[in-house]
Image (cartoon, rainbow, N blue to C red):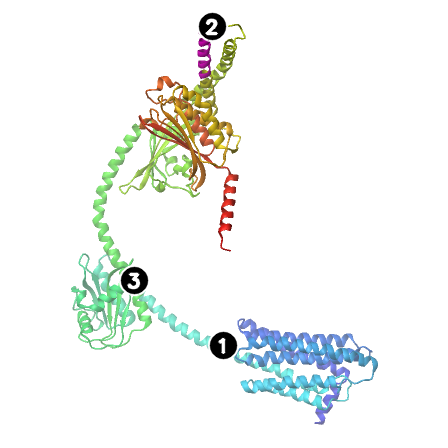
Amino acid sequence: MSAIAALHELLISPPAGFLYHLILLLSIEAGLGMAVHYWRRSPAEPWARRLILAFGGLLLIRAVMIGIALLVRPDTSIFPALWPPLDRLCSFLSLLIIVWAFVLSLLPRPGRTDFWVLGGGTIIILGFYALLSTWWYFTAAQTPDAYFTGSWPDRAWEVGQVILLGTAIGLLLYRRGPSFLLVSLLTLLVGHLLQLVFPGSHPHVAGWVRVSDLVAYPALAILVYHSISTELQSTAQAFQQELREISQDALQRTQELIFLLDANRNVNASLDLITVLQKVVQSLVDGIGAGYGIIALVEKGEAGLMRAVAGYDPLDQGVWQTSDVCFSLKQYPLLEHVIRRRRRVVVQEVEISAQLIAIHALMGSVEIGPLMIIPLVHRKEVLGLVLLSNANSQKLFTAEDGRFAEALAQQVAAAVANARLYRQVDEQRRRLADLLRAQRKETRERQAILESIADGVVVGDAQGKITMVNAAAERIFGRSQRELLGLPIREFYPRLQEGGNGRQRSTSSWSGEGIHTVFEREGRVIEGSLAPVLSDGNSPAGFVAVFRDVTKERQAERAKSEFVSTVSHELRTPLTSIKGYADLLGSGMAGEISPQQKTFLGTICTNVERMVKLVNDLISISELGGVVELQREAVDVTQVIHEAVETWAPRAAEREIIITAELPSSLPPVDADPSRLRQIMDHLLSNACKFTYPGGKVSVRAELHEDTAGTGKRNTFLLISVSDTGVGIAAEDQERIFERFYRADNPLQVEAGGAGVGLAIVKSLVEAHGGRIWVESWVGEGSVFSFLLPVAQSALQEQDDRNTEVLLHRSPL
């Protein structure tokens, strides 16, 4: 007891106090080093991370204490006011970390109590420290000789630590924790009890606590070393056991692999199926140590029949006595069940039954035993069965036996399928040779026909790749046949680049319609027509494209258009003068004229107006050959239609024709050029009046209409129709009625006159607005010209707003 008291007196002196902190720091560093090493070996171990955090926290606390001890000298006035509460705080926090790291980890679910013990305890200790350190600071300032050791705050600290250690020791005894940990905690408890009962002679240092710390902290380091060593030894033993198991499994897998390789070599060694199956069944029986086995194949073309074609019995020197036996599956329900399920069946518990006796008799055995049946399945088709039995040894089949047998069965199924395929290929080889010779002859004939055609002809497959071209196509494109073959036809037909939904189209998506294109290549204008080649199922199987060099025709057409435009502009000025002077004479400003002269002048004016309209149409059709410039705005369609009808009503009345406009009460405005829209209406009404007999009727109608208009999605348009009860248009003329300078034959053709450009102008203007136009006509009954114009976006927005207001008004909320 005197030695311990001497140690106590030594530790409360200044030089030994620094040595005390240094010893504790080295013990903590040793524990931290071992914890880090353990974590590196087992990074997934939670206790390793807990030890690192615990010893790291302890090391930080002791480092702070040593730093303060070095910076603040004990003989200064500030040392008695700051050091004693801080020393008790660090001691309490260290005990809390030790209990959290070593005691709470023994609980079944330590994670749930970690936060409350460590976090809550730290908050309570810091709060208690704030109160007591403040009290002690003012007490030390008023009474410099006051003793912190033995004071009521000091006793409060010790009581709290004794309660914490007692609780921890109780939990440790309950969970039967390590003995080293129990010794460490008991040592700390004894030290704090002695400090509580016998405070000592030093005014501020807890000497008994330091004595117990010098014993407990090295013991904790020894505990960590012992625990880690035990854990590593257990891990090493587990690794050794696992390595032995892996080695045994690898040896077994190697043996199985050798048998599989041997079976695979047998499968590829011969083209004779029976020879191959005989060698494979021998490898299979030897590989799993079975008593004997057979392979039976499904009879092709015979439903429900199988034939045993190979077998192996090691006890009879491999001789199988029941070779080439044909049997019906109806006699063996178990075999029929395996074929229907397409899965392996293993019968381990053998009971005497007629079915098992029959199956073993089929295999050439009078005894029954464990049985394994594996289906030979290739691409979801059952080709046969593998039957293995251990009737001689009564040994049960293992899961490894089943996996090995199934792996080998897959090779057998592939061999059977390949053999059948080989026979089929051999049978078809002669037929294909004959077909190939006939196809080559047909190809040569087709190529000769293609070469004799003056136009360029390109043939391709369903993927849009060029497969055949003639010499004319080589000349037109300036490329050799080798350069053209394999090119995508999309290079010459941009319309195939995208479908309606923005994806690339291929020839397999065609619906049978042809595609026409015109493009320039190296200064030449080439015109092409593309059409799909349909198979028997009416699905595209390829394409045929015909190309023609129309450079000279286009140049002639361009020269004609330029000539017409030039002549038209040259005629406009004299015609304007003629009309002006005729109007001047008719008004009497140049002198009085007779009624007959006035009639003649009226005829002149009428014909001049027709000439002016013809010239304007010719100029318009030449301008529309380029880009049509539109001054778009929201146009009131009702007003434009009424103005056009009022303009043409007097002229129609001269021919006893009635013009009416049947329009809804309100129509949304359209997004259009008002002058161009009026030009469209004038041309359609003019045609309707020209080709309607006297007493007939012309009607204009308009309504909202939803249409895809070639965009792939539905849009809102305004549908405007001009119908008449005139002569009508023949079906063969309806396809060309919108072409330039085309005039269909009808009884009123001579009387109507015109250059045949009005409908071409209308079509160009409608399409420039983003719409389309079409005609429905019946000879002798009349025609209906309909076109679509896009509705202005402002009108659509107003309609959506009105619909939203109606829905809100009707809502029950």
The residue identified by callout 1 is 235
Query: Along the polypeptide, which appears first: circle 2 or circle 1?
Result: 1
The kind of secondary structure element at disc 2 is loop
Q: Marks 2 and 1, how far apart in space?
A: 132 Å
**Which x, y percent locates residue 550?**
39, 25
The amino acid type, in three-letter code, at marker 1 is Thr
The amino acid type, in three-letter code, at marker 2 is Ser
Indicate which label's residue lies in the foreground, 2 or 1.
2
501 versus 199 height, above or below: above
Query: Along the polypeptide, which appears first: circle 3 or circle 1?
Result: 1
Q: Marks 3 and 1, how far apart in space?
A: 40 Å
Looking at this rendering, what residue extends furthest in the bottom direction? 1
Q: Main secondary structure of the magenta part?
A: helix
Q: Pick the residue in front: 5 or 465.
A: 465
The residue identified by callout 2 is 594
The kind of secondary structure element at disc 3 is helix
- What residue is shown at x 37% (from left), y 35% (from top)? 482
The amino acid type, in three-letter code, at marker 3 is Gln
Q: Pick the residue in front: 403 or 792.
A: 792
The residue identified by callout 3 is 410
Q: Tell me the magenta residue range.
A: 595-610
**Label 1: few (<14), some or many (≥20) within 10 Å?**
few
Indicate which label's residue lies in the foreground, 2 or 3.
2
How many numbered circles does the render carry? 3
Q: Is residue 227 magenta?
A: no
Q: Is residue 597 magenta?
A: yes
Q: Marks 2 and 3, how far apart in space?
A: 114 Å
